[in-house]
Image (tube, rainbow, N blue to C red):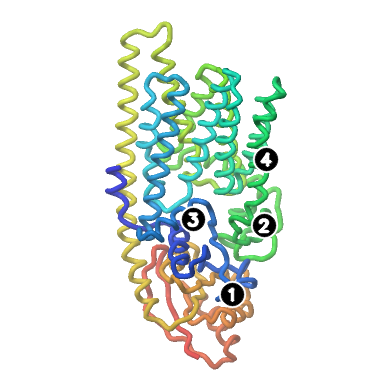
Amino acid sequence: MGNVLYGAVGLRGSDQYWYVADLLMSKFTDSPVTNAIYPTVAATASLTDLPPRIHNLPITHLAGLAHQSGVSDYLSWVSVNVFLAILIALCLYFVARIQGYSYSFIAPAVFLTFPLTLWLSINALAEMSLALGASLLILGSVVASSIARAESRSISTGLLIMSAGSILMFYTRDNYALLLPAQALLTIWMCRKNRNRWLLAAPSLIITVVLVALKPLIFPPYAHAGVLSQLMAGTPSEKGQMTSYYDLAQAPFSLSEFVSKVGMGLAEAIVPSSPSEVITESAVLLVVVAGISLIRNNQSSRMVKYWALVVLGIYLASSAAFQAQNRYIFALVPFVAVFAVGLIDQLKQHKRATGWVSVVAWVAVGSILIGCAAGSFLMAREYKYQAQTEIEQTRKLGGELAREPSGSVLAVADTSQVLPLTYAAVPRPVIALNPLISSPEEAARLIEDWDVRILVGASKAHLEYLSLAVDLAFDGRATLITRPTYEAPGGPIQVWVIEP
């Protein structure tokens, strides 16, 4: 908690600006909408009918409730993340107790001190929701298996908990749809020798199917070009970042480029690229592999290992097919906590264990916790350093935009510049275009439809593109007033005001 208080000084990042800006938009509009307008929604949305949040997830609504109650936009995310982290720690403690491990407190201690837990507690991101879902999968597994040994009808409790975990993860990230067939296979395996168990399993399966079907209605998605475009992200043929939002058409699929991307994505998911990833990535993979390989098999441990393999497979597949990001591995950290306490308990109970083994085990536990706490402090310090700079930049940018005439913003800068601009401009809609994809004629139409009065770019080429679009929109009867260059988190940006 001390590291959270030390590091959580304010907002920084990339996607984090979307997550926080959408809380502000909800307060202005009383609706879960976004001011981030990309071409995939620009034609169907309007000033009076804004699109749903880009990240329209259960956790964003929970953070929204915190914000509506009076907590600041950024601290709403921190408070929700910390609350979920404590909830996860409790789940892991009960898992260790049900498993019969002697030192159950080690599991929550490992999770709470782990550096990625700190990092994702003070960042406005949704990964804590995935970790909670993974914890529910683990808890449901040990509850169902321990009850199954007693042949109790309460086996449905464990299956319902697992169902809640898989649904939460699927509602948070679409790629976790792969959990659903895994859940069905596990249910079949559990019921294979006892037909009566199908009656107990039916409620969880029915609830899962219904909630999967209702997801687009409960949390309407932000439109994008499609899965093929997302699969081609990061390949040489992509015209820029986030092409699936900038281009209405599906990107042409190239098998050779995709295969090359898969290889690089897998390498990035497994091989650390920085010292911090040795702790936050390599350590996770090492403990998960050790837990799967070395922990003795019983009914509950087999189920936990099963879910660990499934979540590990989804992490690797997502990194290979879409994008490798270090935070995506966080869904495996609850498994790390459970496997860590399991391995220590198994070591201490080994028939050849001596007093020295016990001492070594405790020294190892202490070293791990101290190392994790130290790593968390270093990550908190790094976050604080980055955030202090970005906070001042977005504050100045927001103040300058507030002085400009009313109207929407059209931006053709890089994604790293557009995202903080979207936050600073709230509640103005920010229409983001890629000049390599959208023609000046398309930009002119959007200037008219969205009542654009402020233009943002980062180069002379951007000015030429925007000038032509303004001439087309106003038939040459408008002028551009140049404002000073502003230092934004993603780099310097230039602002122009349209004067009809």
Whole-angstrom CA distance, mark 2 to mark 1, is: 22 Å
> Is label 2 in contact with label 4 (beta carbons under 8 Å)?
no
Q: Amino acid at mark 1?
A: Ser
At label 3, counting other C-alpha atoms closer than 10 Å, the crowd grade (few under 14, some 14-19, many 20 or more) is: some
Q: Secondary structure at mark 1?
A: loop
Residue type, numbered disc 3 = His
Q: Nearer the viewer, mark 3 or mark 1?
A: 3
Q: Which residue is mark 4?
A: 206
Q: Are marks 4 and 1 in contact (CB under 8 Å)?
A: no
Give the spatial CA distance, label 4 vs label 1.
Answer: 38 Å
Q: Which mark is residue 226?
A: 2
The residue indicated by pointer 1 is 46
- Mark 4 and mark 1 lie on one chain; the one further toward the N terminus is 1
Residue position marked by numbered label 3 in the rendering: 61
Callout in the foreground (2, 1)? 1
Q: Going from the N terminus, do you reach mark 2 or mark 4 first?
A: 4
